[in-house]
Image: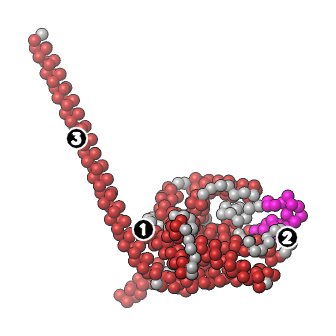
Amino acid sequence: MQTQTKEMNNNLIEKKSVRLSGVELLKIIAIFLICLSHALQTSQSFVDYSPSYDIPKIILVILMNSGQIGNVLFIICSAYFLVDSKKTKAEKTFNLLMDSALISILIFSGFLIGGYSFSSEDWLRQFLPDLFENNWFIGIYVAMYVVHPFLNIIIHNISKKTHFTFCLCVFLFFGLLGFLLADEVAVGNLAKFFMLYFIVAYMKLYCGDFANNRKKNVVWFLIFFAIFCIVGVLDRIAPVWSPNFSRFVMLEYWFSPITLPMLLFLFNIFKSFQFKNKFINYLSSCSLFVYLFHENILLRTYIRPQYYQYVMGLNPDLYFWWIMLCAVSMFVGGMILSVIYKETLHRLTVYLSKKLAVGFYKLRDYIYSKIDKSNIHSQKCLEDNNLLNEENADFNTQENSLENNQKNEKY
């Protein structure tokens, strides 16, 4: 009996500790799409993407949206689990920032060894990459993680109708309007994270029946994916018919009324895959490291352009395959470096982050105790003053009463 109970407890622990691998696989796909997008961005200096009937170029231009698709998918995956969280772990916050800085310093050191020279401003940017937005996504992601418990307080204390109204306003104003005007409504990246967080939270809290129906999500995903491809193709060939159609839709931003629903359906499909694979989960845990390695500003500025200059010199007609090779190389190379980093230096940053977190909590408690004492002292002084005023009022009342009695006796 005891053995059976122990086995049941072990199974429960295992279920809690091992995530389902469907969502983790989607995160891996998301980081590859981001690598593909960055490969395409650099290729714009070497490939003519002017509107044409060239099928490979049409495909590549549509794939340029893959970066925003990868970003949104990654946020959807993260937000879905953070909605149930009630606190922020300081050690995780410190660890993300520390890993970002350390990877940036390692790559920077490699360039210095290679003979590159940099200004003092470049040195500062490499040592503080998130502060200077060398890695904009990491900085914004950390900010969202830090404040997500407060977002959850709002989410769990507003009515379903109020929550729906907010999501509808985001869809209409930031989605549909931007799509029709062919210009994304100006809003900061952090605000985008928050708005997307609220949309994912609504889906999780109130759309369970639909979100858990794989068949419906597959059907709707295929419908929106077909629309996405058709609109993308028309967007490229319409200017061939008339130069006035320089652009008439927006697909590559976060709240596109075509792209965002498509990605939410895709997330629900992968979420429905109830399997566990430690290898997939392990690679998924390296996804942020892949981003930090492949999209370092120095690699983006120096190495990728040199790659394209070299391969285009070999055979420019193979541009499609050179771009794919660049994307796959960044993804595979970034994943290999990420695994090595995770098993070596990341262990050090985890240790240091825990120490920093302990120090931060001690500092917080010390400051709070001082502030709390001062508040108690102020409250006590206020109570003493109130008591003194009451005593003075009683004394004056008694004194006035005595004077009145004396006057009456004399009268």
Q: Is residue 110 above or below residue 68?
A: below
Query: Is residue 237 covered in magenta?
Result: yes
Query: How packed is label 2: few (under 14 Cα within 10 Å), some, or many (20 or more)?
Result: some
Which of the 4 quarters of the picture holds residue 390?
top left
**Residue that appears at 68% across and 63% down:** 253
Query: Residue at label 3?
Result: 384
- Disc 3/disc 1 C-alpha distance (Å): 40 Å
Residue that appears at 85% across and 64% down: 238
Q: Residue furthest left?
A: 410
- Residue most extreme to the right: 241
Residue nearest the observer in this picture, 304 or 268: 304
Within the image, what quadrant is residue 266 found in? bottom right
Q: Earlier in the sequence, mark 2 or mark 3?
A: 2
Q: Main secondary structure of the magenta part?
A: helix
Which residue is labeled 1 in the image?
Answer: 90
Name the kind of residue labelled 2 in the image.
Ser
Q: Which residues are magenta?
A: 228-248
Identify the element where label 2 is drawn: loop
Residue 326, relative to residue 97: is it above or below? below
How many discs appear? Answer: 3
Query: Which labelled disc corresponds to residue 117?
Result: none
**Sequence order check: which comes first, mark 3 or mark 1?**
1
